[in-house]
Image (cartoon, rainbow, N blue to C red):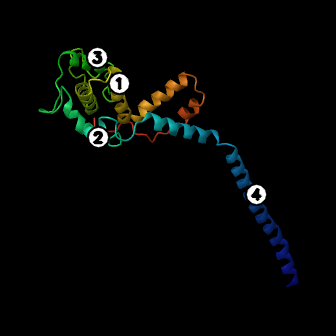
């Protein structure tokens, strides 16, 4: 009987020692991890934080200043904004609400519309043709043309560049993945060394398209 107790003690003691050692090792690893975190984030974490900041700065959110409340639209409700603004489109707008531009206003409309497009939806490189007619009939393009016509008519003091920039802000909300990827590549070409890791770790959870086409 005594011999069995001795053998059990011989077997138990190393096992307890092992558990204690593992526990101490775990504690030390946590301390080391906390110390490392306090000195700075890992590269992957830094890349994610930078990506998140770029996304926040690049993809517009909330109600557009100046005209957003007037039209009751928000960058956070893309499909609703498309439905409300597309009615102003000179070509495919709603009868009684479509905005028909003439003279210098139509010249501005064509000039602005030739410089941008929905691009990732239909593959066209302009919103309008040379005569001002629609280059494609997707909902994104109709909304962008409707907004261009609305701003030309109701914000005549806005420059062509300002209206164009506003149209492109909406395109970012329509196609967040493509437009943000293009922005990252642009920054990489400009020599931003941190962008390479962001592109390599670029999350695929962003939708390719928001709003019906």
Q: Secondary structure at mark 3?
A: helix
- Residue 8's label in the rendered image is none
Residue located 87% across and 78% down the image: 6
Query: CB of mark 1 within 8 Å of CB of mark 2?
Result: no
Q: Point out residue 104 in the picture as x, y percentages from the top left corner.
A: 22, 15
Q: Which residue is mark 1?
A: 162
Q: Which residue is mark 3?
A: 111
Q: Point out residue 42 in the picture as x, y percentages from the top left corner.
A: 65, 42
Label 1 CA crowd tier, 10 Å (few <14, some 14–19, many 20+): few
- Residue 25's label in the rendered image is 4
Rendered-image quadrant of the C terminus: top left
Residue 157, image quadrant: top left
Q: Quick one: 21 or 193, which is closer to the camera?
A: 193
Q: Earlier in the sequence, mark 4 or mark 3?
A: 4
Residue located 82% across and 76% down the image: 8
Residue located 75% across and 61% down the image: 22
Spatial CA span between label 2 and label 4: 59 Å
Is residue 137 in sight in this rendering? no
Spatial CA span between label 4 and label 3: 68 Å
Spatial CA span between label 3 and label 1: 13 Å
Query: CB of mark 4 within 8 Å of CB of mark 3?
Result: no
- Left or right: 97, with 122 as reference point: left
Please state which of the two labelled residues, at mark 4 or mark 3, is closer to the viewer.
Answer: 3
Spatial CA span between label 2 and label 3: 27 Å
Q: Which residue is mark 2?
A: 69
Q: Point out residue 198 in the picture as x, y percentages from the top left corner.
A: 55, 34
């Amino acid at each position: 009987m005594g011999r069995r107790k001795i053998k059990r003690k011989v077997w138990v003691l190393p096992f307890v020692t092992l558990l204690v050692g593992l526990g101490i090792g775990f504690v030390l690893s946590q301390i080391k991890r906390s110390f490392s975190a306090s000195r700075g984030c890992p590269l992957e974490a830094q890349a994610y934080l930078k990506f998140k900041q770029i996304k926040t700065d690049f993809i517009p959110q909330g109600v557009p200043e100046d005209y957003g409340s007037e039209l009751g639209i928000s960058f956070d409700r893309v499909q609703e904004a498309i439905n409300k603004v597309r009615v102003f489109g000179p070509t495919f707008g709603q009868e009684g609400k479509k905005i028909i531009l003439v003279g210098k206003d139509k010249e501005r409309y064509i000039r602005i519309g030739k410089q941008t497009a929905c691009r990732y939806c239909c593959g066209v490189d302009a919103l309008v043709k040379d005569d001002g007619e629609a280059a494609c009939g997707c909902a994104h393009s109709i909304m962008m043309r409707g907004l261009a016509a609305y701003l030309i008519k109701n914000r005549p003091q806005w420059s062509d560049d300002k209206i164009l920039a506003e149209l492109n802000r909406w395109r970012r909300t329509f196609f967040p993945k493509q437009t943000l990827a293009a922005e990252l590549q642009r920054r990489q070409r400009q020599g931003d060394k941190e962008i390479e890791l962001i592109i390599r770790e670029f999350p695929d959870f962003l939708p390719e398209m928001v709003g019906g086409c």
